[in-house]
């Protein structure tokens, strides 16, 4: 059985910054034939749930209160990558627009809800290491 990394919040785990989850039935149903490995890079990197929202500003990840959490985000991304490599994951399905998991579009660092082109810290690291990344809005692209 092939393994896939999946953002834990998409599977119903309450690990988002606001203490909630974002369960996605399409993701859950599409992956029934896979060994699903839930990850939350932010929590794995040492951040609590709930926590202040964060956005990428330049090359840093900054909470809305000004706290620099770049190291925690990078640590969580490294842990996620190691899990993916250990489990021979060919792809990951991650939470759209997240500063960890977003792919293609992320919030622009103004905390205004404005999107900009870019990838989250974890998504970028996974892709640089040959692991395909989809967000939950691309689930229908999977030919499973």
Image (spheres, grey):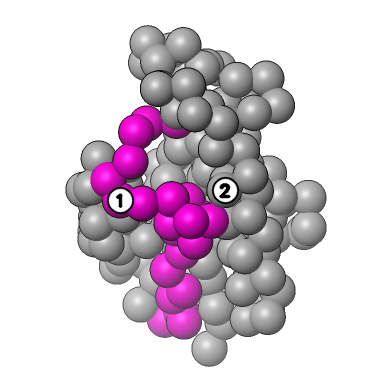
Marks 2 and 1, how far apart in space?
13 Å
Asked if residue 64 lies in the magenta stretch, the reply is: no
Sort mark 1 into few (<14), some (14-19) or many (20+) by Cα contacts within 10 Å: some
Instruction: Name the secondary structure under disc 1.
Output: loop
- Looking at the image, which residue is at 47% across and 21% down? 66
Measured from the top left, where is residue 137 in percent x and y? 40, 42
Q: Nearer the viewer, residue 45 or 119?
A: 45
User: As rendered, which of 67 and 26 lies closer to the eye?
Assistant: 67
Write down the region rendered in magenta. 33-54
Establish if 24 lies above or below 124: below
**Looking at the image, which residue is at 67% across and 20% down?**
58
Residue at 43%, 50% (x, y): give it.
47
Pointer 1: what residue? 49
Residue 44, given in percent of the width and then of the height, sits at: 49, 61
Residue 60 in sight in this render:
yes
| Residue 26 appears in the picture as rendered | no
Residue 46 in the image, given as x and y percentages of width and height: 48, 56
Q: Quadrant of residue 96?
A: top left
The secondary structure type at the circle numbered 2 is: helix
Residue 38, image quadrant:
bottom left
Q: Residue furthest left?
A: 20
Q: Which residue is mark 2?
A: 72
In the displayed structure, does residue 24 sit left or right of residue 78? left
């Amino acid at each position: 059985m092939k393994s896939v990394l999946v953002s834990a919040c998409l599977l119903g785990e309450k690990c988002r910054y606001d203490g909630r989850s974002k369960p996605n039935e399409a993701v859950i149903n599409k992956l029934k034939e896979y060994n699903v490995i839930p990850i939350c890079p932010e929590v794995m990197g040492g951040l609590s749930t709930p926590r202040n929202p964060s956005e990428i500003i330049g090359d840093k990840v900054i909470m809305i209160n000004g706290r620099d959490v770049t190291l925690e985000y990078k640590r969580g991304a490294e842990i996620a990558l190691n899990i993916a490599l250990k489990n021979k994951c060919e792809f990951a399905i991650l939470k759209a627009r997240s500063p960890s998991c977003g792919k293609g579009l992320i919030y622009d660092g103004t905390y205004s809800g404005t999107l900009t082109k870019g990838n989250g810290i974890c998504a970028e690291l996974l892709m640089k290491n040959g692991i395909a990344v989809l967000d939950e809005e691309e689930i229908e692209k999977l030919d499973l």
